[in-house]
Image (cartoon, rainbow, N blue to C red):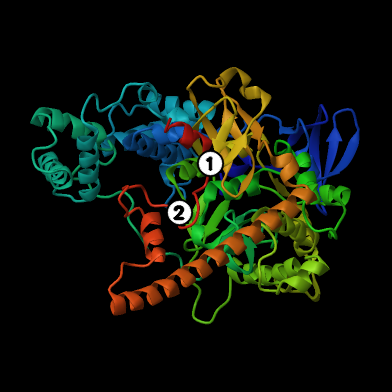
């Protein structure tokens, strides 16, 4: 079985001949031409629908294929590291049993060839191999049980179910000792002459160096022996060689992408236009985008401050894998963003909704990451393994060469910056210079989404020319439709409930006023029965989109909770208030700088007089000392000439 067939079996693609359910009927896919899917029903009825609208329709599913099981980020992060590594190791072995393909890319081994051997024979071969590697209780029944558990529950089915309980595999051992043993195992990994005794001695040295000698009570040697055996990977005990040996990459560069979403590259480029940050100051902006190498379509584009670091890869996965029409509350959010932007738009709201519904969205087969383009965590790796997404690092291009997604993204950033400057009102263009910030970050993100949908995806590009038609350039949207028909396979996106699952999460309390996160308040009627009870709930949020959050209630589902002030904050009148507030903040900053300069001049004159007459220090110096808290009262330091930001809860705590 090839990699493409394995991906199709996992539910991530629909090829010609597949059975799908659409509009409460069963259909068979008979063709993919020009971005349209041709369907045929059992009673002789036929149909034709756009591929993007088919996969985003309500009730669409592939008959006979299970939906992807994404492990919850909070549950996966709470598992011990050895348990997660063992589940990953099981996943690699199970995939080799089912498909014959190994992670090393060395081809199909003879004992796992699905064209020659049955599934039972491949399971027995895997059990024998694991027994030779030292895995305990590695029988054929164990391999079959783990394979069926993965089919039912996904990656969490491969986890030792005892680790999901409240008890810990380390018992009541001090967490500082556990951390030291894990660090010792990491340092000794791959050393052939390492013994358990040496691991224990190294862990004792780490504890003494980190916390001080004699400050942490160590268990007995027998308990430490059991602890090391409990934390060590059974497939890689101390003294064994490392399983992941590095090897040079294949010559000739990365393979070419021939299908939509086959290879998607993630890159970051600086945007040559500033934006108004949350504190009212101008911030430098960068754009991190996921570009399909085969068609040039931008599957995801996220704006963020340049100083904030890379965007989390889970946010990009949520943006590229979940179609916008399936996201909770998307039409209302788009209408609010459309009303709060420029007066002259590229397209009307109905036209934009229709164009956005046709925008490509898919789960990529391979993600190619530029250096520092996106942050990868353990939870993201678990999600990628569950969805069958391979991760690669983009090789550095040769000297003077321009290839990959970064050159195209730099062109996109330059062209969009011109559009953002030209979209400002004429009055603002006359008052402000072109290099001054005018748009806020949410407005700039909305402008970028509209510009990509209406301009970039419909603009012919140089790299999308066919060798036999060198004078006919195609647009990314057109190339996506051409490749769908040529490949005969349509990549599938995720459902709407997966959007909140992919976003990063944290624990927040539900108060009488709702949820407070990032200085904003989120509230909805679904929180009524949980207010003020002291419980902390799992809350998922988009770090660069503050319009709504997703809270997991006791029913186990993620519920969207909107920003309480989102409705009026996007109106034009409130946008005027925001700009007035920014002008007041700028005036205050300029005034405080002038006051400090005046006080410095006055202090210099007074110092000169004091030197001549021997008098006391000036009143300006006394006021400055009192403001800094160095006077006789011993108060805390405050800003000269005023008060800090008023916080009612902090003020009530002082009563």
Residue ranking furthest to the bottom: 400
Q: Residue at x 19, y 51 (%)?
A: 191
Q: Is residue 55 visible?
A: no
Q: Position of residue 314 (x, y in %)?
A: 54, 46
Vertical comparison of 334 with 462: above or below: above
Closest to the camera, between mark 2 and mark 1, is: 2
Q: Residue at x 70, y 57 (%)?
A: 579
Instruction: Tell which of 345 and 147 is nearer to you.
Output: 345
Q: Residue at x 52, y 36 (%)?
A: 648
Q: Secondary structure at mark 1?
A: loop
> Label 1, on which residue?
115
Vertical comparison of 398 with 581: above or below: below
Q: Quadrant of the C terminus?
A: top left
Lower position in the chain sequence, tag 2 or tag 1:
2
Q: Residues within 10 Å of mark 2 (few under 14, many from 20)?
A: few
Instruction: Tell which of 411 and 385 is nearer to you.
Output: 411
- Total count of labels: 2
Q: Which mark is residue 105?
A: 2
Q: Position of residue 518 (x, y in %)?
A: 54, 43
């Amino acid at each position: 079985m090839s990699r493409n067939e394995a991906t199709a079996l996992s539910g991530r693609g629909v090829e010609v001949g597949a059975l799908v359910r659409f509009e409460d009927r069963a259909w068979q896919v008979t063709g993919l031409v020009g971005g349209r899917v041709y369907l045929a029903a059992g009673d002789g009825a036929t149909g034709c629908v756009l591929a993007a609208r088919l996969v985003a329709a309500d009730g669409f599913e592939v008959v006979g294929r299970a939906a992807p099981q994404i492990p919850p980020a909070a549950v996966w992060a709470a598992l011990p590291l050895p348990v997660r590594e063992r589940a990953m190791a099981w996943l690699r072995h199970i995939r080799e049993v089912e498909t014959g393909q190994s992670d090393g890319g060395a081809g199909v081994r003879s004992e796992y060839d699905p064209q020659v051997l049955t599934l039972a024979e491949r399971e027995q071969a895997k059990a024998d191999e694991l027994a030779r590697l030292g895995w305990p209780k590695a029988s054929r029944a164990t391999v079959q049980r783990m394979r069926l558990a993965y089919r039912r529950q996904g990656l969490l089915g491969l986890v030792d179910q005892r680790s999901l309980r409240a008890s810990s595999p380390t018992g009541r051992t001090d967490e500082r000792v556990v951390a030291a043993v894990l660090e010792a195992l990491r340092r000794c990994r791959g050393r052939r002459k390492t013994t358990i005794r040496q691991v224990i001695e190294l862990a004792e040295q780490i504890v003494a160096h980190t916390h001080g000698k004699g400050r942490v009570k160590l268990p007995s040697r027998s308990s430490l022996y059991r602890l090391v055996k409990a934390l060590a990977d059974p497939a890689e005990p101390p003294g064994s060689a490392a399983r992941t040996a590095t090897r040079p990459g294949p010559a000739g560069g990365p393979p070419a992408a021939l299908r939509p979403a086959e290879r998607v590259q993630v890159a970051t480029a600086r945007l040559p236009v500033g934006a108004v940050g949350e504190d009212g100051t101008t911030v430098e902006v960068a754009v991190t985008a996921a570009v399909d190498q085969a068609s040039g379509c931008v599957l995801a584009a996220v704006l963020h401050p340049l100083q904030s670091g890379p965007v989390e890869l889970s946010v990009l996965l949520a943006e590229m894998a979940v179609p916008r029409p399936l996201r909770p509350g998307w039409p209302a959010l788009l209408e609010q963003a459309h009303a709060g932007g420029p007066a002259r738009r590229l397209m009307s709201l109905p036209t934009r909704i229709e164009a956005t519904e046709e925008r490509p969205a898919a789960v990529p087969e391979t993600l190619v990451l530029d250096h520092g383009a996106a942050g990868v965590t353990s939870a993201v790796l678990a999600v990628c393994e569950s969805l069958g997404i391979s991760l690669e690092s983009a090789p550095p291009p040769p000297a003077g060469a321009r290839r990959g997604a970064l050159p195209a993204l730099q062109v996109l950033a330059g062209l969009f910056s011109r559009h953002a400057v030209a979209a400002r009102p004429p009055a603002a263009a006359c008052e402000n210079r072109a290099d001054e910030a005018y748009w806020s970050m949410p407005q700039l993100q909305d402008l970028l989404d509209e510009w990509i949908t209406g301009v970039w995806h419909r603009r012919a590009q140089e790299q999308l020319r066919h060798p036999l038609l060198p004078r006919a350039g195609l647009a990314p949207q057109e190339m996506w439709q051409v490749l769908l028909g040529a490949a005969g396979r349509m990549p599938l996106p995720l459902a709407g409930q997966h959007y909140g699952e992919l976003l990063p999460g944290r624990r927040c309390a539900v108060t009488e006023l709702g949820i407070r996160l990032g200085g904003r308040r989120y509230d909805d009627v679904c929180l009524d029965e949980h207010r003020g009870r002291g419980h902390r709930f799992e809350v998922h949020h988009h770090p660069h989109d503050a319009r709504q959050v997703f809270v997991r209630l006791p029913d186990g589902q993620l519920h969207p909770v909107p920003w309480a002030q989102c409705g009026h904050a996007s109106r034009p009148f409130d946008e005027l208030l925001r700009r007035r507030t920014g002008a007041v903040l700028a005036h205050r900053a300029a005034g405080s700088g002038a006051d400090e300069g005046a006080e410095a001049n006055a202090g210099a004159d007074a110092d000169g007089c004091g030197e001549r007459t021997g008098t006391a220090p000036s009143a300006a110096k006394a006021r400055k000392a009192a403001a800094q808290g160095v006077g006789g009262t011993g108060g805390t330091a405050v800003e000269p000439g005023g008060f800090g930001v008023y916080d009612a809860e902090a003020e009530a705590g002082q009563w």
